[in-house]
Image (cartoon, rainbow, N blue to C red):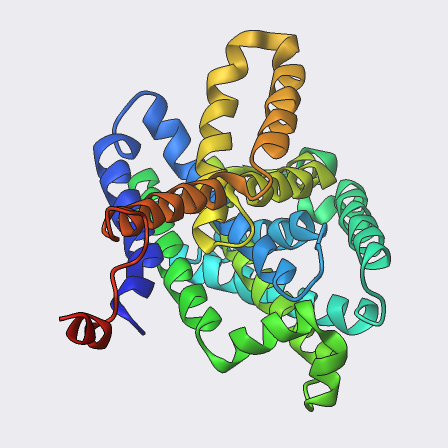
Amino acid sequence: MRSSEWLVPVGVTAAAVVIGLVTGLGDGVGALVVPWICIHALLAMAMRLVMQVGEINLAVGAFYGIGAYTAAQMNLLLEAPLLVSVVAGGLLAGAAALVFGGLVLRVSGAAFILVSFAANEVLRLTLTKTEWVGGNSGLVGVFADPRAVVTAMVIVTGVVALLLVMLERSRWGRQFAVVENKPLLASCAGINPRSVKLIALVASGVICGVAGGLFAHYSSVVAPPDFSYMISISVLAFVMIGGRDHLLGAVVGAAVLTYLTEEMRMFGAYEPVIYGGALMIAMVLMPKGLVGAAHDVLRRVTDSRRGSSSDPTGEPSPAPREKERAS
């Protein structure tokens, strides 16, 4: 891995640690925003992982809920520690993603979007009718040290970012790109697109489950409304606003929109209108997202600097051999 490729995980980890220590573990707005940024960043990275194989998974809320309920039950019934509960939530969500993917990855595109949306709502409605998980009231009383939970969120967010960067630079990451852009070529090259998509979906499910387990311990309460289709729509917005072409875009989108959501609570009933309008304007003005727009600006600045180092007449300086002939 080249040194420049460490920018995303190192940057995410450093920023999360600094913000978490300065504000997240204290009092005030930071204590509320930083944990949610970590949770939303995990979900956004999970969403983007499936988008890298050409699909949009609106069942993110379902896997998030499976992880949350699993971790909550582990804590309430078995008094399992934080790490064990969160890992169990991630594994069970990954197993659910494996079953779900095995059944529905026969379809793709709009059909997959609709099926994943339906799966999310089926799980939510099932939870409301299941009494042993609290029904519509959910589960209450999940106990954990708040500082330990926030610290775990910061560490997990950085570790997941690092692992995903390594994945993108690996053979699997190259296969993801081929499956997304040229599925027929992938089949001709001996790559099974369905298997590659299943791997991405399972990995995404594990990340969502871990995020759900952290959420359960942070909020102390899990209930079906927390895992409706709206969480999947919000996560998709995080990815698109931040920039789906960059892993950092998922994190930046989650951070910016989470912070704006907290700031716009002062507008009361007008909050959804202002929030939706801001999203529309951002998508029109920056179709590549915040990180994509920043990348384009930096590239233009770099190109202009290279241009200024050329010959004063505006032409590039001659090659060494041409200079010798001229002399």
User: Would you identify the image quadrant in which residue 304 lies?
Assistant: top left
In the rendered image, the residue lying farthest to the left is: 327
- Give the percent coordinates (x, y) of residue 223: 65, 38
Residue 1 left/right relative to 280: left
**Is 274 above or below relative to 186?**
above
**Is 178 above or below relative to 318?**
below
Residue 311 left/right relative to 57: left
Residue 245 left/right relative to 180: left
Residues 276 and 81: in front is 276
Residues 57 and 149: in front is 57
* Quadrant that contains the N terminus: bottom left
- Give the percent coordinates (x, y) of residue 9: 34, 58
Residues 263 and 191: in front is 191
- Asked whether residue 298 appears in the rendered view, the answer is yes
- Give the percent coordinates (x, y) of residue 118: 83, 50
- Give the percent coordinates (x, y) of residue 119: 80, 53
Residue 248 left/right relative to 281: left
**Is 149 above or below relative to 165?**
above
Q: Residue at x 60, y 9 (%)?
A: 268
* Quadrant that contains the C terminus: bottom left
Q: Residue at x 68, y 65 (%)?
A: 97
**Is 161 above or below relative to 22?**
below
